[in-house]
Image (cartoon, coloured by chain):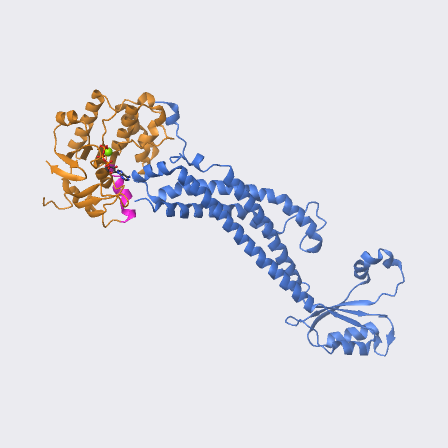
Amino acid sequence: MSKRSLLRPARFDDLGLRRALSDRLLPALVAAMTFLAALTLAGVMVASSVAHHWQTGAAAILTVQVPQPGTDTAGGTRLDRVTTLLRGSPGIASVRVLSSTELAELLRPWLGNATQASALPLPAVLDVRLSPGTTEPDPTLQGRLSEVAPGTFMESHGLWLQRLTTLARSLQACAAAALLLVAGVGAAVVAVAVRAGLAARRDAIDIVHGLGATDSFIAGQFANRATLLAAAGGCLGAVAALPVLLALASLASPFLDTLPSDALLPTLPMPLWISLPILPLAAAAIGWLTARVTVHRWLRRLP
Amino acid sequence: MTQRDSESMIRLEGVGLRYGSAEPVLRDISFSIPSGGFRWLLGPSGAGKSSLLRLLYLANRPSVGHLSILGQDINAATRRDLPPLRRQIGVVFQDFRLMPHLSAFDNVALPLRLAGRPEGQIHADVEEMVRWVGLQRRASARPAELSGGEQQRVAIARAVIGRPSLLLADEPTGNLDDRQATRLMQLISEMNRLGTTVIVATHNESLVQRYPGRSLRLAEGQLINDV
Ligand SMILES: Nc1ncnc2c1ncn2[C@@H]1O[C@H](COP(=O)(O)OP(=O)(O)OP(=O)(O)O)[C@@H](O)[C@H]1O
Ligand SMILES: [Mg+2]
């Protein structure tokens, strides 16, 4: 008896699927799908993160500018009077005067470092937050502000925020649709490959079917192979997406305060770190399920 | 014939078979074989011997009539009921139907593996069977590398390795020399003596004369005697 037949590998390929479902095309296509899914996922997360950021951190902001804040009037400086008025108004949660350093930081793109030393007459800027549930300030507020300190200018971000949130939501919905589409195309790719494998092994399947193999056994053989190939493709795609995602993250970091922009290496947001390894698992699951369903349906033609 | 299904291994009543919409290849076949029985299946080429065996190894269902095998009513059986029955039936196909990508050894081992027998228990049995059909030196060869007679011996070994309750052999000596044919008939007789129900389809009249037994004779798709 020869060595070849005695040294049977533990998971033997009775149906010859190693050749019928080759390790070239399917993993490559699944890798491409996974790559797309990773990019889409990154898109979803950036959109969610931006939406979240604006909804909580910066929601319903009102900016109030007071020119010549230090000028004394009857009830204290102009700034004091505005602050008092705002604090006493309904629907306002907090009022904070930006420090001169913060102001300088805001203006630096336009004025450079000159602001620190210069004697430019800068207005005071107040960061006003509305109480939760309020998106627009009281319509009479501007009039009352002008009364206590003429020239005071109020800017509401409510509508703009709403539009930004809507945009973020739409982006999320599109990304979710794209993910579903990618998963669907991935399943179709697996189904086509499995059907080609079934056609290539038609005789072998007839034989084992005749010898009493159950549909589950035959489907299981295909599913094992498809799962392996899809998982390999998934890993490949996820690994290939990693450098792209890191590059995108480093580009996006200045806009997202959740990311430390001063880190030596750009890092990905936590949800992306978690979902990236899930992609190959999802690819494997799609491969397994699609192969089983495809084979079971195909086998119904046999008696 | 008043045997109940539980006593007869095979029972056909008015069975007919047609492939697609062509003329029926089997018509109004009725017979039964008790458990442990032996039958030759005789008739000229094209009479329908292989077609009748196809019904018995559950590769086709009857187009009309009633069929029961191993005590199971096949007309009422679902697809799920059939694999366990098939595993109790050993078949030597006229065209062998070996797995082209598997070695002779692995072809013989296939029924045991499909039955879920642990790998450790398979080797000794398969080795013995491969030796018995005289292929120990060719165990690792693929079917394409074997002669017709060698392939037939692999097919025979695969059919009997699982100690089936029912053995169906379609022209099993077609590619064997006299000595091998005699050995095969000795094996079949021995299995039959130990309780296996056997049907052997053949053209080989001299073999039938050397091993007399009851026979089913087909002509143009009809049973002309059951003696
Ligand atoms: N799959 C099939 N589709 C259509 N017709 C078939 C099929 N298989 C067999 N036949 C036809 O059925 C008839 C009986 O064929 P079968 O193979 O059962 O004969 P047989 O008695 O086994 O012949 P042989 O002794 O030559 O093997 C023949 O006319 C054949 O052409
Ligand atoms: Mg025939």
In this picture, is A196 found above or below A111? above
Q: Which quarter of the rendering shows the N terminus of chain B?
A: top left
Quadrant of the image occupied by residue B105: top left
- Chain letter, blue: A
Q: In the displayed image of the protein, which residue is found farthest to the right? A: A119
Q: Where in the figure is residue B154, as x and y percent of width and height?
A: 29, 28
Is A148 placed left or right of A53 in the picture?
A: right
Q: Residue B207's spot in the image, x, y percent?
A: 16, 25
Position of residue B212 relative to residue A242, above or below, is above
Q: Is residue B85 magenta?
A: yes
Residue at 56% in and 53% down: A178
Magenta run includes residue A155: no
**Viewer-closest of B90 and A257:** B90
Residue B196 in view in this figure: no
What span is in magenta?
Answer: B78-89
Comparing B170 with B16, the one in front is B16
Residue sitting at 50 percent across and 51 percent down?
A184
Q: Nearer the viewer, residue B5 or B149?
A: B149
Quarter of the image that includes the C terminus of chain B: top left
Per the picture, the main secondary structure of the magenta-coloured stretch is helix
- Residue at 39%, 24% (x, y): give it: A3
* Chain B on-screen colour: orange
In percent of width and height, residue B41 lies at 17, 34
Left or right of B144? Residue A155 is right
| Residue B128, image quadrant | top left
Q: Quadrant of residue A128?
A: bottom right
Answer left or right for B195 relative to A17: left
Count of numbered tags: 0
Q: Position of residue A43 (x, y in %)?
A: 62, 53
Looking at the rendering, the quadrant in which ligand 1 lies is: top left
Residue A279 seen from this side: yes
